[in-house]
Amino acid sequence: MGAKVWRQYGAGRYGQIHLTMAQPDAGPGSLTPVVCFHPSPMSGASYKVFQRVLAEDRLVLCPDTPGFGGSDGPDTPVTIPDYAAAMTDLLVGLGYGAKGKGPVDVVGCHTGTLIGVELATGRPDLVRKLSLPSLALFTAEERTKMKVQFGGPQPILTDPDFVPKVWRTTVIEGSTDSPPERRLELFVERLRSGTKGWFGPEASLNYDCESRLKQLTQPLLLLVLNEMLGPNTRRAKDIVKHAVLVDISAQAAHGAWDAQAQLMADSMRAFFDAA
Amino acid sequence: MSTLRRAYGTSRYGQLHYAAAGPNGTTDKTPVVCFHQSPISGAQFKLFQRAMAVDRLVLCPDTPGFGGSEGPSRLPQIADYAAAMGDWLDGLKLGPVDALGFHTGTLVAMELAILRPELVRRLSLTSLALFSDAERERNRKIFGNPRPLFDDPDYLGRYYRDQVSAADSAISEVRRLELFTERMRAGANSWWGPAAVFAYDTAERAKLVSQPTLLLVMRDTLADATRRASALFPRSRVVERLDWHGPTAWDAKATEVAGDVSRYFDGAA
């Protein structure tokens, strides 16, 4: 069983939104479609391998957040609610929601988890269930600390060695979980946000995830991986009592979206398709 | 003011990505299609496209395997690229277009004009990829082979310096970064475009171009070649703009280049 993959543009408040669609060769089927929100500064291409696996039995949409990948973006820094509003534009434009094709299931990673949480709380008619591995849940104190390292503009043009350094660390010395061609592809996707790539991390570090999680009513899967946000993801169970926590950290680390795509997809299928 | 939209069409290699710009009102002018240098993408023409699109539809496709277009799985020829562009134009049902090319794009444009004459009304070619046998062999050795992306840890740093941090300041650093990124999008097969160029017999094929052809000579490594080609194209006109630097003029002189090209496309043949 294979998946048919294609790319297209939709519309959001910042302009065109680029997305990759995948569905079973025979058609989208009857299962709820899944929308995957990516980490920043990457693009929907982060999910390429995972998307194909999950799309063997349902429609899977991987949009590029405004300003990333192939999507038009804002001129100045925006907030997670702004990104979520743009994704609302996209999904409503594609016919989802109470008055249309119904809700979608949401997958997120890092920045994408926050867009998922905000979308689910702001527009509950658009989101049925959420699966959030690597949830970017930080205390106010952690956010202050992280802003020192990840906040504000990166010296992408002021430091002539910045881009070559990213190349060395992510491609030449990057994880061998994926082949060099794939590491190159992800390096390029990272570059596509240009000098505005910091808008995504900045929005994440300004977002009060905990407050919003308390308002979440939809079923939530907290999939714990062996990566930097594993402990944060686990902690979210104390906030969202109805969440289902599944720990696959013994088998899956940061590169799991590619290297353990089948395990990731199966874990989410079990949750999304349960009564 | 022209508006720019991006979209996907279809070619024999899969989805073909392009940017379209046109005036807000209607126009009866022939649409223009711009074929880019490799290994960049249609984004190379972004500023020129907007300038040219004030009174006509201007389309900038990404050659298969470059930018956002899906590519072949085996090393293609220029005729393959041109045929794929024919597929795409057939799908758009625009009727005949005026075709503009730069470097690799000159060959895609002229080959499309030969293979599908009903699709191309006029041509504008800058930095025509026309080589003597010795030049072709020398260039093939330099550009027509795989880049040492993964084997030479310093390759990317050098490439980045050449294209961005120490490159021609006629265009902004932000724009240079954008174009560098477009170059990198072609990945490990980025050399396929240049390789197809060096396998193409430009001199012989040029004699078969029946459409009126503007040879717009800018200051560039291929300026002499473009000038020399006037003896080969049956219906050519040479315009010399040596004060314009070929690789950066599409940005730095966008309005001026659009003026020259528009005048030729709109004038008597």
Image (cartoon, coloured by chain):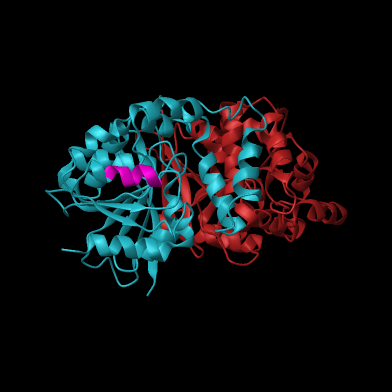
Chain colours: A cyan, B red
Q: Residue drawn 60% across and 40% down?
A: A166
Reply yes or no: does residue A233 show up in magenta: yes
Q: Is residue A226 above or below residue A232?
A: below
Reply yes or no: does residue B141 show up in magenta: no
Report the number of discs: 0
Left or right: A97, with B242 as reference point? left
Depth order, front residue of A250/B209: A250
Depth order, front residue of B239/B200: B200
Q: Residue furthest left?
A: A99
Q: Is residue B102 above or below residue B16?
A: above
Image quadrant in which you'd find residue B168: top right
Depth order, front residue of B128/A48: A48
Percent from the top left, x then y, of residue A149?
A: 50, 29
Q: Which residues are magenta?
A: A230-236
Left or right: A84, with B64 as reference point? left
On the rendered image, what quadrant is the N terminus of chain A found in?
A: bottom left
Image quadrant in which you'd find residue B28: top left
Q: Residue drawn 47% across and 48% down?
A: B18
Percent from the top left, x then y, of residue A72?
A: 40, 37
Percent from the top left, x then y, of residue B93?
A: 40, 56
Q: Residue furthest bottom?
A: A1
Depth order, front residue of A98/B258: A98
Q: Residue drawn 29% across and 30% down?
A: A208
Percent from the top left, x then y, of residue A211?
A: 23, 32
The answer to whether one can see residue B152 in this image is: yes
On the rendered image, what quadrant is the C terminus of chain A found in?
A: bottom left
Image quadrant in which you'd find residue A181: bottom right
- Main secondary structure of the magenta stretch: helix
Left or right: A176, with B204 as reference point? left
The answer to whether one can see residue B209 in this image is: no
